Each structure stands twice: as C-alpha cells, then as structure tokens.
Image (cartoon, helix red, strand yellow):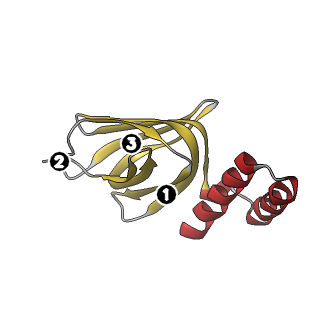
Amino acid sequence: MAAELHVELVAADRSVWSGEATLVVARTTSGDIGVMPGHQPLLGVLESGPVTIRTTDGGTVVAAVHGGFLSFADNKLSLLAEIAELADEIDAQRAERALERAKSDDDDAAERRADVRLRAVAVR
C-alpha cells in the first residue's frame, strides 16, 4: 500500500488544489468519508461541507465545497465541485455578513453556503 495519494480538487471555473496527501475527509450524500492511500475504488456525490486534506508534509488544506462528485481509484482522488474555495481565500467577516443576510432573507441555500464557508475557516 502506498503512503500517499494524489488529490485534485477542481471547481467548475478553476483548479483549486493539487498535491499529495495522506488523508482526505469529505461529506457525501452517504455521510462523511475519509480516504487514505489504498482505499477501495469509490464514486460519491459531494454535499456542501468542508473538505480537509492532510498533506504529506504534515500540513492541512481546508476548502469549502458546494456540491459535485468525488472519485477514487489507483491512489488518485478527484474532487469535482460545483463551487470550491480554499479556507485561506475566505473572508470570515464577509461570510458572517452573508450568513446574516441569508437568514434575514430566509434564503436556505445561501445560508448553507455561508455556513460551510465559515466552518471551513474555523477548521483551518
């Protein structure tokens, strides 16, 4: 079994992150899943939530992901998201304002997006 897996996190409009990892945790329609090197082949539907990537150098990359798919085979994990942003790119104050605005507008979808962004910032 290999000690690392190759990860590609891609959004509809850009490549978000690519590199080697020892563990990736993501939320799917079946629940949270952790993928490590040597995992069985897998295809899943991503739900909105933070994705946590433990890099081979001991670092952590966190992204807010909104919908998409994940696929794992031959120690290669592809996360194809509708929308994805790295936690380091998220302005927490702006996300908090968006959450408050979504709550006052009774916009459940916008509220979920803002909540995921804030959770991703909290994990980093």
Q: Amino acid at mark 3?
A: Val
Q: Earlier in the sequence, mark 3 or mark 1?
A: 3
Q: Nearer the viewer, residue 81 or 2?
A: 81
Q: Tell me what residue is drawn at x 61 percent, y 33 percent.
A: 14
Q: Tell me what residue is drawn at x 54 percent, y 68 percent.
A: 123
Q: Earlier in the sequence, mark 2 or mark 1?
A: 2
Q: Amino acid at mark 2?
A: Ala
Does 33 sit left or right of 109 as displayed? left
Q: Nearer the viewer, residue 95 or 108?
A: 108
Q: Which residue is mark 3?
A: 7
Q: Residue furthest bottom?
A: 122
Where does the image place residue 65, in percent across and percent down from the top left? Answer: 57, 46
Please, what secondary structure does the residue beneath circle 3 have?
strand
Q: Tell me what residue is drawn at x 22 percent, y 34 percent.
A: 74
Q: Is residue 20 above or below residue 97?
A: above
Q: Earlier in the sequence, mark 2 or mark 3?
A: 2
Gap between marks 2 and 1, in whole Å? 20 Å
Please, what secondary structure does the residue beneath circle 1 have?
strand
Q: Is residue 23 visible?
A: yes
Q: Which residue is mark 2?
A: 2
Q: Residue furthest left?
A: 1
In the rendered view of the protein, which quadrant contains the C terminus?
Answer: bottom right
Where does the image place residue 96, in percent across and percent down from the top left? Answer: 78, 64
Gap between marks 2 and 3, in whole Å? 14 Å
Gap between marks 3 and 1, in whole Å? 11 Å
Q: Residue furthest top?
A: 12
Does 16 sit left or right of 95 as displayed? left
Q: Which residue is mark 1?
A: 61
Q: Tell me what residue is drawn at x 64 percent, y 30 percent.
A: 13
Q: Is residue 124 visible?
A: no
Q: Amino acid at mark 1?
A: Val
